[in-house]
Image (tube, rainbow, N blue to C red):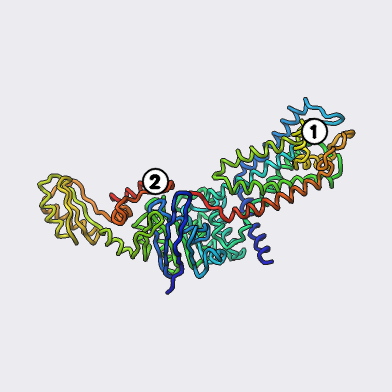
Amino acid sequence: MGNVIEAFGLVKRYGEVVALDGLDLAVQEGSVFGLLGPNGAGKTTAVSILATLLIPDSGSARVAGADVLKEPARVRERIGLSGQYAALDEHLTGLENLDMIGRLYRLGRSRSRARARELLEVFDLSEAGSRPVKTYSGGMRRRLDLAGALVASPPVLFLDEPTTGLDPRSRLDLWGVIRELVARGSTLLLTTQYLEEADHLADRIMVIDQGRDIAQGTPDELKTLVGGERIEVTVVSSSDLPRAQEVMQRFAVGELASEVRNRRVTAPISGGAAVLTKALRALDAEGVNLHDVGLRRPTLNDVFLTLTGHAAEPNGTRGTSEDQSSVRGKATS
Amino acid sequence: MMAVVHMFADAAVIAKRNMIKIKRVPEVLVFVLLSPIMFVLLFAYVFGGSISIPGGSYREFLIAGIFAQTVVFGSTFTGVGIADDIQKGIIDRFRSLPMSQAAVLIGRTASDVVYNVLTLLIMALTGLVVGWRIHSSLWEGLVGFGLLLAFAYAFSWTMALVGLLVPSVEVINNASFMVIFPVTFIANTFVPAENLPTVLRTFAEWNPISSLTQAVRELFGNIPPGTPDPTAWPLQNPVIYTLIWAALIIAVFAPLASLRYQKAVKQG
Protein backbone atom coordinates (compact mmCIF):
# COMPACT_ATOMS: atom_id res chain seq x y z
CA MET A 1 0.00 0.00 0.00
CA GLY A 2 1.23 3.44 -0.91
CA ASN A 3 1.27 6.68 0.98
CA VAL A 4 -1.90 8.71 0.72
CA ILE A 5 -0.50 11.73 2.51
CA GLU A 6 3.07 12.86 1.95
CA ALA A 7 4.75 16.07 2.95
CA PHE A 8 8.30 17.16 2.27
CA GLY A 9 10.14 19.88 4.16
CA LEU A 10 7.14 21.98 5.13
CA VAL A 11 8.14 25.36 6.54
CA LYS A 12 5.76 28.01 7.78
CA ARG A 13 6.69 31.14 9.71
CA TYR A 14 4.47 33.74 11.29
CA GLY A 15 6.80 36.68 11.71
CA GLU A 16 9.37 35.56 14.25
CA VAL A 17 7.54 32.40 15.19
CA VAL A 18 8.47 29.28 13.27
CA ALA A 19 5.32 27.16 13.21
CA LEU A 20 6.74 24.43 10.99
CA ASP A 21 10.43 23.89 10.61
CA GLY A 22 10.95 21.45 7.75
CA LEU A 23 8.37 18.82 8.54
CA ASP A 24 8.28 15.59 6.51
CA LEU A 25 5.54 13.06 6.93
CA ALA A 26 4.08 10.04 5.20
CA VAL A 27 0.80 8.32 5.96
CA GLN A 28 -0.03 4.90 4.54
CA GLU A 29 -3.34 4.24 2.89
CA GLY A 30 -5.97 2.97 5.32
CA SER A 31 -3.94 3.82 8.41
CA VAL A 32 -4.39 6.26 11.25
CA PHE A 33 -1.56 8.67 11.77
CA GLY A 34 -1.38 10.61 15.02
CA LEU A 35 0.35 13.95 15.13
CA LEU A 36 1.10 14.47 18.79
CA GLY A 37 2.36 17.64 20.36
CA PRO A 38 1.60 20.44 22.82
CA ASN A 39 -0.19 23.66 21.95
CA GLY A 40 1.77 25.66 19.45
CA ALA A 41 3.81 22.68 18.24
CA GLY A 42 2.60 23.24 14.67
CA LYS A 43 -0.08 20.55 14.46
CA THR A 44 -2.85 22.82 13.22
CA THR A 45 -0.51 24.55 10.81
CA ALA A 46 0.46 21.20 9.32
CA VAL A 47 -3.17 20.14 8.93
CA SER A 48 -4.11 23.52 7.45
CA ILE A 49 -1.43 23.15 4.80
CA LEU A 50 -2.42 19.58 3.94
CA ALA A 51 -6.09 20.61 3.75
CA THR A 52 -5.18 23.46 1.32
CA LEU A 53 -6.14 26.23 3.74
CA LEU A 54 -2.65 27.57 4.15
CA ILE A 55 0.27 27.96 1.76
CA PRO A 56 3.62 26.93 3.24
CA ASP A 57 6.66 29.18 2.90
CA SER A 58 8.47 26.22 1.41
CA GLY A 59 8.07 22.50 0.97
CA SER A 60 5.51 20.43 -0.88
CA ALA A 61 2.80 17.93 -0.14
CA ARG A 62 0.58 15.42 -1.91
CA VAL A 63 -2.77 14.24 -0.61
CA ALA A 64 -4.78 11.46 -2.26
CA GLY A 65 -2.68 11.68 -5.38
CA ALA A 66 -2.98 15.43 -5.89
CA ASP A 67 -0.48 18.18 -5.24
CA VAL A 68 -1.68 20.41 -2.40
CA LEU A 69 -0.18 23.55 -3.89
CA LYS A 70 -0.78 22.95 -7.59
CA GLU A 71 -4.14 21.18 -7.54
CA PRO A 72 -5.92 22.32 -4.38
CA ALA A 73 -9.36 21.83 -5.96
CA ARG A 74 -8.63 18.13 -6.59
CA VAL A 75 -7.37 17.71 -3.05
CA ARG A 76 -10.56 19.27 -1.67
CA GLU A 77 -12.67 16.73 -3.53
CA ARG A 78 -10.96 13.92 -1.64
CA ILE A 79 -10.62 15.20 1.90
CA GLY A 80 -12.80 15.84 4.89
CA LEU A 81 -11.69 18.27 7.59
CA SER A 82 -12.92 18.61 11.11
CA GLY A 83 -11.21 21.41 12.94
CA GLN A 84 -10.19 22.12 16.47
CA TYR A 85 -13.21 24.34 16.97
CA ALA A 86 -16.45 22.94 15.67
CA ALA A 87 -16.98 24.93 12.47
CA LEU A 88 -20.72 24.95 12.42
CA ASP A 89 -23.39 27.53 11.89
CA GLU A 90 -24.94 28.07 15.30
CA HIS A 91 -28.23 29.26 13.92
CA LEU A 92 -28.76 26.40 11.52
CA THR A 93 -30.06 23.07 12.71
CA GLY A 94 -27.86 20.00 12.63
CA LEU A 95 -29.67 18.80 9.54
CA GLU A 96 -29.33 22.16 7.78
CA ASN A 97 -25.62 22.27 8.55
CA LEU A 98 -24.98 18.85 7.04
CA ASP A 99 -27.32 19.49 4.13
CA MET A 100 -25.49 22.73 3.34
CA ILE A 101 -22.16 20.90 3.28
CA GLY A 102 -23.66 18.17 1.10
CA ARG A 103 -24.93 20.73 -1.37
CA LEU A 104 -21.52 22.38 -1.47
CA TYR A 105 -19.95 18.97 -2.18
CA ARG A 106 -22.53 18.96 -5.03
CA LEU A 107 -24.33 15.85 -3.89
CA GLY A 108 -27.62 17.20 -5.25
CA ARG A 109 -30.71 18.08 -3.29
CA SER A 110 -32.15 14.66 -2.44
CA ARG A 111 -28.86 12.84 -1.98
CA SER A 112 -27.59 15.60 0.25
CA ARG A 113 -30.69 15.44 2.47
CA ALA A 114 -30.55 11.66 2.66
CA ARG A 115 -26.86 11.71 3.54
CA ALA A 116 -27.44 14.33 6.23
CA ARG A 117 -30.14 12.19 7.85
CA GLU A 118 -27.98 9.10 7.61
CA LEU A 119 -25.07 10.83 9.33
CA LEU A 120 -27.28 12.25 12.08
CA GLU A 121 -28.38 8.68 12.71
CA VAL A 122 -24.80 7.37 12.80
CA PHE A 123 -23.72 10.11 15.20
CA ASP A 124 -26.73 9.70 17.44
CA LEU A 125 -28.03 13.16 16.63
CA SER A 126 -31.30 12.26 14.89
CA GLU A 127 -33.42 13.78 17.61
CA ALA A 128 -31.32 16.92 17.87
CA GLY A 129 -31.15 17.24 14.08
CA SER A 130 -34.05 19.67 13.89
CA ARG A 131 -32.73 21.97 16.62
CA PRO A 132 -30.38 24.90 16.04
CA VAL A 133 -26.79 23.98 16.83
CA LYS A 134 -26.54 26.66 19.52
CA THR A 135 -28.61 24.38 21.76
CA TYR A 136 -26.06 21.54 21.42
CA SER A 137 -23.56 20.45 24.06
CA GLY A 138 -19.85 20.52 23.31
CA GLY A 139 -19.80 16.80 22.60
CA MET A 140 -22.75 17.04 20.22
CA ARG A 141 -21.11 19.89 18.34
CA ARG A 142 -17.95 17.87 17.87
CA ARG A 143 -19.91 14.91 16.62
CA LEU A 144 -21.80 17.09 14.18
CA ASP A 145 -18.58 18.70 13.02
CA LEU A 146 -17.06 15.29 12.49
CA ALA A 147 -20.18 14.26 10.59
CA GLY A 148 -19.63 17.33 8.41
CA ALA A 149 -16.22 16.02 7.44
CA LEU A 150 -17.78 12.71 6.36
CA VAL A 151 -20.61 14.03 4.21
CA ALA A 152 -18.93 13.12 0.93
CA SER A 153 -17.30 9.93 2.34
CA PRO A 154 -13.86 11.27 1.47
CA PRO A 155 -10.98 8.79 1.33
CA VAL A 156 -8.75 11.05 3.46
CA LEU A 157 -9.77 12.61 6.74
CA PHE A 158 -8.08 15.28 8.81
CA LEU A 159 -9.20 15.62 12.40
CA ASP A 160 -7.55 18.47 14.24
CA GLU A 161 -7.75 17.86 17.99
CA PRO A 162 -11.17 16.25 17.77
CA THR A 163 -11.59 15.85 21.52
CA THR A 164 -9.81 18.87 23.00
CA GLY A 165 -12.01 20.48 25.62
CA LEU A 166 -14.45 17.59 25.84
CA ASP A 167 -15.40 15.88 29.06
CA PRO A 168 -14.04 12.32 29.46
CA ARG A 169 -17.34 10.67 28.53
CA SER A 170 -17.83 12.62 25.32
CA ARG A 171 -14.21 11.87 24.51
CA LEU A 172 -14.77 8.14 24.86
CA ASP A 173 -17.89 8.38 22.68
CA LEU A 174 -16.00 10.21 20.00
CA TRP A 175 -13.15 7.68 20.10
CA GLY A 176 -15.70 4.98 19.42
CA VAL A 177 -17.01 6.85 16.40
CA ILE A 178 -13.52 7.48 15.05
CA ARG A 179 -12.55 3.83 15.46
CA GLU A 180 -15.59 2.81 13.42
CA LEU A 181 -14.63 5.21 10.68
CA VAL A 182 -11.20 3.78 10.49
CA ALA A 183 -12.54 0.26 10.36
CA ARG A 184 -14.28 1.26 7.12
CA GLY A 185 -10.94 1.96 5.51
CA SER A 186 -10.52 5.74 5.59
CA THR A 187 -7.05 7.13 5.92
CA LEU A 188 -6.96 9.42 8.91
CA LEU A 189 -4.55 12.06 10.09
CA LEU A 190 -5.37 13.05 13.63
CA THR A 191 -3.75 15.66 15.81
CA THR A 192 -3.92 15.52 19.56
CA GLN A 193 -2.31 16.69 22.76
CA TYR A 194 -3.11 13.45 24.49
CA LEU A 195 -0.76 10.50 24.24
CA GLU A 196 -3.61 8.35 25.48
CA GLU A 197 -5.73 9.41 22.51
CA ALA A 198 -3.02 8.79 19.95
CA ASP A 199 -2.35 5.45 21.65
CA HIS A 200 -6.01 4.46 21.36
CA LEU A 201 -6.54 5.50 17.80
CA ALA A 202 -3.32 5.72 15.85
CA ASP A 203 -1.30 3.05 14.06
CA ARG A 204 1.62 5.38 13.95
CA ILE A 205 2.49 8.46 15.95
CA MET A 206 4.73 11.38 15.21
CA VAL A 207 5.66 13.62 18.10
CA ILE A 208 6.28 17.18 17.04
CA ASP A 209 7.69 20.09 18.95
CA GLN A 210 8.30 23.59 17.62
CA GLY A 211 7.43 22.47 14.13
CA ARG A 212 9.92 19.59 14.09
CA ASP A 213 9.52 15.83 14.10
CA ILE A 214 11.17 14.68 17.32
CA ALA A 215 10.08 11.04 17.39
CA GLN A 216 8.08 8.63 15.31
CA GLY A 217 6.87 5.09 15.74
CA THR A 218 4.03 2.83 16.73
CA PRO A 219 2.32 3.64 20.04
CA ASP A 220 4.14 0.69 21.64
CA GLU A 221 7.51 1.85 20.39
CA LEU A 222 6.90 5.32 21.82
CA LYS A 223 5.68 4.01 25.13
CA THR A 224 8.68 1.75 25.41
CA LEU A 225 10.81 4.77 24.70
CA VAL A 226 9.32 6.68 27.62
CA GLY A 227 9.02 3.75 29.94
CA GLY A 228 5.49 2.46 29.82
CA GLU A 229 3.19 2.31 32.83
CA ARG A 230 4.30 2.13 36.42
CA ILE A 231 3.00 1.93 39.93
CA GLU A 232 3.98 4.58 42.43
CA VAL A 233 3.74 3.66 46.08
CA THR A 234 4.30 6.11 48.93
CA VAL A 235 4.53 4.55 52.37
CA VAL A 236 3.55 6.17 55.65
CA SER A 237 6.78 5.50 57.47
CA SER A 238 10.22 5.10 55.94
CA SER A 239 10.73 1.89 57.97
CA ASP A 240 8.21 0.26 55.63
CA LEU A 241 10.22 1.22 52.56
CA PRO A 242 12.39 -1.95 52.30
CA ARG A 243 9.34 -4.20 52.58
CA ALA A 244 7.48 -2.15 49.96
CA GLN A 245 10.50 -2.44 47.67
CA GLU A 246 10.60 -6.17 48.19
CA VAL A 247 6.89 -6.56 47.33
CA MET A 248 7.01 -4.28 44.31
CA GLN A 249 10.02 -6.14 42.95
CA ARG A 250 7.72 -9.13 42.40
CA PHE A 251 5.51 -7.15 40.02
CA ALA A 252 8.08 -4.97 38.35
CA VAL A 253 9.10 -5.61 34.75
CA GLY A 254 12.24 -3.55 35.12
CA GLU A 255 14.32 -1.78 37.70
CA LEU A 256 12.65 -0.17 40.70
CA ALA A 257 13.22 3.46 41.46
CA SER A 258 13.20 4.51 45.09
CA GLU A 259 13.17 7.94 46.66
CA VAL A 260 13.97 7.53 50.33
CA ARG A 261 13.31 11.14 51.18
CA ASN A 262 9.77 10.97 49.73
CA ARG A 263 9.26 7.40 51.00
CA ARG A 264 8.32 6.44 47.47
CA VAL A 265 8.92 3.37 45.29
CA THR A 266 8.20 3.39 41.59
CA ALA A 267 7.92 0.08 39.73
CA PRO A 268 7.59 -0.26 35.97
CA ILE A 269 4.82 -2.76 35.29
CA SER A 270 2.81 -4.19 32.49
CA GLY A 271 -0.82 -5.21 32.94
CA GLY A 272 -2.43 -2.08 34.28
CA ALA A 273 -5.10 -2.14 36.95
CA ALA A 274 -5.04 -5.92 37.39
CA VAL A 275 -1.41 -5.75 38.45
CA LEU A 276 -2.14 -2.78 40.66
CA THR A 277 -4.84 -4.78 42.48
CA LYS A 278 -2.50 -7.69 43.05
CA ALA A 279 0.26 -5.40 44.24
CA LEU A 280 -2.10 -3.72 46.71
CA ARG A 281 -3.17 -7.09 48.13
CA ALA A 282 0.42 -8.16 48.49
CA LEU A 283 1.38 -4.89 50.20
CA ASP A 284 -1.57 -5.28 52.54
CA ALA A 285 -0.62 -8.88 53.33
CA GLU A 286 2.86 -7.66 54.26
CA GLY A 287 1.32 -5.03 56.55
CA VAL A 288 2.75 -2.06 54.66
CA ASN A 289 0.90 1.17 55.53
CA LEU A 290 0.31 3.19 52.39
CA HIS A 291 0.16 6.93 52.24
CA ASP A 292 -0.56 7.05 48.53
CA VAL A 293 -0.61 4.72 45.59
CA GLY A 294 -1.20 5.25 41.91
CA LEU A 295 -1.03 3.70 38.50
CA ARG A 296 0.86 6.09 36.33
CA ARG A 297 0.67 5.99 32.54
CA PRO A 298 3.08 7.90 30.36
CA THR A 299 1.66 11.21 29.25
CA LEU A 300 2.63 13.67 26.62
CA ASN A 301 4.65 15.36 29.32
CA ASP A 302 6.68 12.21 29.91
CA VAL A 303 7.24 11.84 26.19
CA PHE A 304 8.49 15.38 26.06
CA LEU A 305 10.65 15.12 29.10
CA THR A 306 12.23 12.01 27.67
CA LEU A 307 12.67 13.26 24.13
CA THR A 308 13.50 16.92 24.62
CA GLY A 309 14.46 17.29 28.22
CA HIS A 310 11.80 19.97 28.63
CA ALA A 311 8.16 19.74 29.55
CA ALA A 312 5.40 20.15 27.01
CA GLU A 313 5.14 23.90 27.31
CA PRO A 314 3.01 25.69 24.79
CA ASN A 315 4.94 28.30 22.86
CA GLY A 316 1.84 29.63 21.19
CA THR A 317 -0.90 31.69 22.71
CA ARG A 318 -3.62 29.16 22.06
CA GLY A 319 -3.26 27.28 25.29
CA THR A 320 -6.28 27.68 27.50
CA SER A 321 -6.09 26.92 31.16
CA GLU A 322 -8.54 24.12 30.52
CA ASP A 323 -6.23 22.37 28.09
CA GLN A 324 -3.32 22.77 30.41
CA SER A 325 -5.03 21.36 33.43
CA SER A 326 -6.32 18.35 31.54
CA VAL A 327 -2.80 17.52 30.45
CA ARG A 328 -1.54 17.94 33.96
CA GLY A 329 -4.54 16.15 35.40
CA LYS A 330 -3.71 13.08 33.38
CA ALA A 331 -0.19 13.03 34.64
CA THR A 332 -1.33 12.35 38.16
CA SER A 333 -4.28 10.06 37.52
CA MET B 1 -19.41 27.42 -18.36
CA MET B 2 -19.90 24.65 -15.81
CA ALA B 3 -17.78 26.64 -13.39
CA VAL B 4 -20.15 29.60 -13.62
CA VAL B 5 -23.18 27.38 -13.05
CA HIS B 6 -21.46 25.85 -10.03
CA MET B 7 -20.52 29.24 -8.72
CA PHE B 8 -24.11 30.45 -8.76
CA ALA B 9 -25.44 27.17 -7.37
CA ASP B 10 -22.95 27.36 -4.48
CA ALA B 11 -23.65 31.06 -3.95
CA ALA B 12 -27.35 30.21 -3.70
CA VAL B 13 -26.60 27.62 -0.99
CA ILE B 14 -24.61 30.22 0.96
CA ALA B 15 -27.27 32.89 0.48
CA LYS B 16 -29.95 30.49 1.66
CA ARG B 17 -27.91 29.75 4.77
CA ASN B 18 -27.61 33.49 5.51
CA MET B 19 -31.35 33.93 5.02
CA ILE B 20 -32.11 31.19 7.52
CA LYS B 21 -30.10 33.22 9.97
CA ILE B 22 -32.36 36.24 9.43
CA LYS B 23 -35.28 34.02 10.38
CA ARG B 24 -33.57 32.46 13.42
CA VAL B 25 -32.20 35.69 14.90
CA PRO B 26 -35.08 38.11 14.47
CA GLU B 27 -33.48 40.46 17.01
CA VAL B 28 -30.96 41.50 14.40
CA LEU B 29 -33.71 42.30 11.96
CA VAL B 30 -35.58 44.33 14.56
CA PHE B 31 -32.56 46.58 15.08
CA VAL B 32 -31.84 46.74 11.39
CA LEU B 33 -35.37 47.99 10.88
CA LEU B 34 -35.66 50.21 13.95
CA SER B 35 -32.64 52.36 13.25
CA PRO B 36 -33.91 53.64 9.88
CA ILE B 37 -37.25 54.52 11.48
CA MET B 38 -35.33 56.39 14.13
CA PHE B 39 -33.26 58.17 11.48
CA VAL B 40 -36.28 59.30 9.50
CA LEU B 41 -38.07 60.56 12.59
CA LEU B 42 -35.02 62.29 14.07
CA PHE B 43 -34.12 64.10 10.89
CA ALA B 44 -37.70 64.94 10.04
CA TYR B 45 -38.52 66.45 13.40
CA VAL B 46 -35.18 67.64 14.79
CA PHE B 47 -33.64 69.14 11.65
CA GLY B 48 -36.81 69.33 9.60
CA GLY B 49 -38.11 72.22 11.63
CA SER B 50 -34.99 74.38 11.65
CA ILE B 51 -33.59 73.94 8.14
CA SER B 52 -35.55 75.44 5.33
CA ILE B 53 -35.26 74.73 1.65
CA PRO B 54 -36.37 77.56 -0.61
CA GLY B 55 -39.59 76.58 -2.29
CA GLY B 56 -39.83 73.11 -0.88
CA SER B 57 -40.07 70.85 2.11
CA TYR B 58 -36.87 69.89 3.91
CA ARG B 59 -38.43 66.62 4.92
CA GLU B 60 -38.89 65.56 1.34
CA PHE B 61 -35.41 66.79 0.47
CA LEU B 62 -34.03 64.80 3.37
CA ILE B 63 -35.60 61.41 2.74
CA ALA B 64 -33.43 60.51 -0.27
CA GLY B 65 -30.33 61.43 1.76
CA ILE B 66 -31.38 59.21 4.64
CA PHE B 67 -32.15 56.36 2.26
CA ALA B 68 -28.71 56.68 0.69
CA GLN B 69 -26.91 56.89 4.02
CA THR B 70 -28.79 53.97 5.53
CA VAL B 71 -28.27 51.52 2.67
CA VAL B 72 -24.57 52.40 2.57
CA PHE B 73 -24.36 51.77 6.31
CA GLY B 74 -26.15 48.49 5.65
CA SER B 75 -23.02 47.25 3.89
CA THR B 76 -21.42 46.96 7.32
CA PHE B 77 -23.53 43.86 7.67
CA THR B 78 -21.58 42.16 4.94
CA GLY B 79 -18.31 42.81 6.71
CA VAL B 80 -19.65 41.69 10.07
CA GLY B 81 -21.04 38.48 8.56
CA ILE B 82 -17.75 37.58 6.93
CA ALA B 83 -15.59 38.42 9.95
CA ASP B 84 -17.93 36.36 12.10
CA ASP B 85 -17.67 33.37 9.78
CA ILE B 86 -13.88 33.57 9.88
CA GLN B 87 -13.84 33.83 13.65
CA LYS B 88 -16.13 30.82 14.03
CA GLY B 89 -13.99 28.74 11.65
CA ILE B 90 -16.82 28.34 9.13
CA ILE B 91 -14.74 29.88 6.37
CA ASP B 92 -12.07 27.24 7.10
CA ARG B 93 -14.66 24.58 6.44
CA PHE B 94 -15.89 26.26 3.24
CA ARG B 95 -12.32 26.54 2.04
CA SER B 96 -11.72 22.85 2.57
CA LEU B 97 -14.73 21.98 0.38
CA PRO B 98 -14.58 21.45 -3.38
CA MET B 99 -16.95 24.38 -3.88
CA SER B 100 -16.55 27.53 -5.93
CA GLN B 101 -14.26 29.78 -3.92
CA ALA B 102 -16.00 32.94 -5.12
CA ALA B 103 -19.41 31.66 -4.02
CA VAL B 104 -19.07 32.48 -0.33
CA LEU B 105 -18.60 36.20 -0.99
CA ILE B 106 -21.16 36.32 -3.79
CA GLY B 107 -23.72 34.52 -1.64
CA ARG B 108 -23.01 36.82 1.28
CA THR B 109 -23.30 40.08 -0.66
CA ALA B 110 -26.43 38.79 -2.39
CA SER B 111 -28.22 37.85 0.80
CA ASP B 112 -27.39 41.21 2.35
CA VAL B 113 -29.44 42.86 -0.40
CA VAL B 114 -32.45 41.38 1.37
CA TYR B 115 -31.65 43.44 4.45
CA ASN B 116 -31.50 46.56 2.35
CA VAL B 117 -34.81 45.78 0.65
CA LEU B 118 -36.48 45.41 4.04
CA THR B 119 -34.77 48.54 5.34
CA LEU B 120 -35.91 50.60 2.36
CA LEU B 121 -39.43 49.30 2.70
CA ILE B 122 -39.63 50.29 6.34
CA MET B 123 -38.05 53.68 5.70
CA ALA B 124 -40.39 54.40 2.84
CA LEU B 125 -43.37 53.61 5.03
CA THR B 126 -42.03 55.81 7.81
CA GLY B 127 -41.35 58.52 5.25
CA LEU B 128 -44.93 58.36 4.05
CA VAL B 129 -46.10 58.79 7.61
CA VAL B 130 -44.05 61.97 8.11
CA GLY B 131 -45.27 63.50 4.87
CA TRP B 132 -42.82 62.39 2.17
CA ARG B 133 -44.33 61.52 -1.20
CA ILE B 134 -43.08 60.33 -4.58
CA HIS B 135 -44.20 63.09 -6.97
CA SER B 136 -43.00 61.38 -10.13
CA SER B 137 -44.31 58.07 -11.43
CA LEU B 138 -44.35 54.60 -9.89
CA TRP B 139 -41.87 53.57 -12.54
CA GLU B 140 -39.40 56.32 -11.68
CA GLY B 141 -39.88 55.61 -8.01
CA LEU B 142 -38.93 51.96 -8.53
CA VAL B 143 -35.88 52.96 -10.55
CA GLY B 144 -34.87 55.16 -7.62
CA PHE B 145 -35.09 52.24 -5.19
CA GLY B 146 -33.28 50.02 -7.68
CA LEU B 147 -30.43 52.50 -7.90
CA LEU B 148 -30.14 52.61 -4.11
CA LEU B 149 -29.95 48.82 -3.98
CA ALA B 150 -27.45 48.62 -6.82
CA PHE B 151 -25.09 51.13 -5.24
CA ALA B 152 -25.46 49.50 -1.82
CA TYR B 153 -24.66 46.11 -3.35
CA ALA B 154 -21.49 47.47 -4.91
CA PHE B 155 -20.49 49.18 -1.67
CA SER B 156 -20.94 45.94 0.28
CA TRP B 157 -17.92 44.55 -1.61
CA THR B 158 -15.70 47.14 0.07
CA MET B 159 -16.98 45.92 3.43
CA ALA B 160 -16.47 42.31 2.33
CA LEU B 161 -12.78 43.12 1.94
CA VAL B 162 -12.72 44.90 5.31
CA GLY B 163 -14.41 41.88 6.91
CA LEU B 164 -11.65 39.64 5.54
CA LEU B 165 -8.90 41.94 6.79
CA VAL B 166 -9.91 42.77 10.35
CA PRO B 167 -8.93 40.50 13.22
CA SER B 168 -12.36 40.42 14.83
CA VAL B 169 -15.99 41.34 14.40
CA GLU B 170 -15.83 44.14 16.94
CA VAL B 171 -13.39 46.11 14.82
CA ILE B 172 -15.73 46.25 11.84
CA ASN B 173 -18.34 48.55 13.30
CA ASN B 174 -15.75 51.11 14.29
CA ALA B 175 -13.81 50.79 11.06
CA SER B 176 -16.90 51.18 8.91
CA PHE B 177 -18.15 54.09 10.97
CA MET B 178 -14.87 55.92 10.38
CA VAL B 179 -15.26 55.60 6.63
CA ILE B 180 -18.98 55.70 6.07
CA PHE B 181 -19.82 58.58 8.36
CA PRO B 182 -17.67 61.20 6.63
CA VAL B 183 -18.47 59.86 3.17
CA THR B 184 -22.19 60.10 3.77
CA PHE B 185 -22.03 63.47 5.53
CA ILE B 186 -19.69 65.36 3.20
CA ALA B 187 -22.33 65.11 0.55
CA ASN B 188 -25.67 66.61 -0.34
CA THR B 189 -27.45 64.05 1.83
CA PHE B 190 -28.60 66.45 4.53
CA VAL B 191 -27.74 69.91 3.25
CA PRO B 192 -27.44 71.24 -0.30
CA ALA B 193 -23.83 70.86 -1.47
CA GLU B 194 -23.81 74.51 -2.61
CA ASN B 195 -23.77 75.66 1.01
CA LEU B 196 -20.46 73.91 1.84
CA PRO B 197 -17.00 75.58 1.90
CA THR B 198 -15.08 75.13 -1.38
CA VAL B 199 -12.93 72.12 -0.57
CA LEU B 200 -15.77 70.18 1.01
CA ARG B 201 -18.07 71.35 -1.74
CA THR B 202 -15.82 69.90 -4.45
CA PHE B 203 -15.56 66.63 -2.53
CA ALA B 204 -19.32 66.58 -2.05
CA GLU B 205 -19.99 67.24 -5.72
CA TRP B 206 -17.85 64.33 -6.87
CA ASN B 207 -18.86 62.04 -4.01
CA PRO B 208 -20.94 59.16 -5.40
CA ILE B 209 -23.18 59.34 -2.35
CA SER B 210 -24.16 62.84 -3.52
CA SER B 211 -24.90 61.67 -7.03
CA LEU B 212 -26.87 58.74 -5.63
CA THR B 213 -28.88 61.10 -3.44
CA GLN B 214 -29.36 63.57 -6.29
CA ALA B 215 -30.49 60.80 -8.65
CA VAL B 216 -32.98 59.45 -6.14
CA ARG B 217 -34.32 62.94 -5.41
CA GLU B 218 -34.85 63.53 -9.10
CA LEU B 219 -36.44 60.13 -9.62
CA PHE B 220 -38.77 60.64 -6.67
CA GLY B 221 -39.59 64.16 -7.78
CA ASN B 222 -38.35 65.54 -4.48
CA ILE B 223 -36.43 68.52 -5.88
CA PRO B 224 -38.36 71.70 -5.17
CA PRO B 225 -39.37 73.62 -8.30
CA GLY B 226 -37.14 76.61 -8.93
CA THR B 227 -34.05 74.96 -7.43
CA PRO B 228 -31.05 76.05 -9.54
CA ASP B 229 -29.58 73.22 -11.63
CA PRO B 230 -26.37 71.76 -10.17
CA THR B 231 -23.17 72.99 -11.77
CA ALA B 232 -20.99 69.90 -11.31
CA TRP B 233 -21.13 67.19 -13.99
CA PRO B 234 -21.72 64.29 -11.57
CA LEU B 235 -24.80 66.00 -10.21
CA GLN B 236 -26.03 66.90 -13.67
CA ASN B 237 -25.82 63.24 -14.71
CA PRO B 238 -26.38 61.56 -11.38
CA VAL B 239 -27.76 58.19 -12.54
CA ILE B 240 -24.92 57.50 -14.96
CA TYR B 241 -22.29 58.77 -12.56
CA THR B 242 -23.65 56.59 -9.74
CA LEU B 243 -23.74 53.52 -11.95
CA ILE B 244 -20.16 54.13 -13.10
CA TRP B 245 -19.08 54.27 -9.47
CA ALA B 246 -20.99 51.10 -8.63
CA ALA B 247 -19.32 49.28 -11.53
CA LEU B 248 -15.90 50.63 -10.56
CA ILE B 249 -16.27 49.60 -6.93
CA ILE B 250 -17.23 46.06 -7.92
CA ALA B 251 -14.46 45.87 -10.51
CA VAL B 252 -11.86 46.82 -7.90
CA PHE B 253 -13.14 45.33 -4.68
CA ALA B 254 -14.68 42.03 -5.81
CA PRO B 255 -11.33 40.72 -7.13
CA LEU B 256 -9.44 42.10 -4.13
CA ALA B 257 -11.87 40.48 -1.71
CA SER B 258 -11.77 37.20 -3.63
CA LEU B 259 -7.98 37.15 -3.56
CA ARG B 260 -7.97 37.85 0.14
CA TYR B 261 -10.56 35.15 0.71
CA GLN B 262 -8.16 32.54 -0.66
CA LYS B 263 -5.88 33.35 2.25
CA ALA B 264 -8.47 33.74 4.96
CA VAL B 265 -7.70 31.42 7.84
CA LYS B 266 -9.04 31.53 11.32
CA GLN B 267 -6.33 33.05 13.50
CA GLY B 268 -5.42 31.17 16.64
Q: Secondary structure at mark 1?
A: loop
**Residue A192 horizontal side relative to residue A255, left or right:** right
- Amino acid at the residue labelled 2: Glu
Q: Which mark is residue A322?
A: 2
Q: Dot 2 falls on which chain?
A: A
Q: Secondary structure at mark 2?
A: helix
Count the marks: 2
- Amino acid at the residue labelled 1: Pro
Report the mark closest to the observer, 2 or 1: 1
- Image point 78% across, 38% down: which residue? B205
- In the image, residue A81 lies at what x, y percent? 49, 60
Q: Tell which residue pokes out farthest to the bottom in this image.
A: A1
What separation in Å lies between label 2 and label 1 (alpha carbons)?
A: 59 Å
- In the image, residue A33 lies at what x, y percent? 40, 64
**Residue B81 horizontal side relative to residue A190, left or right:** right
Q: Badge 1 is on which residue? A: B192
- Image point 13% across, 54% down: which residue? A245
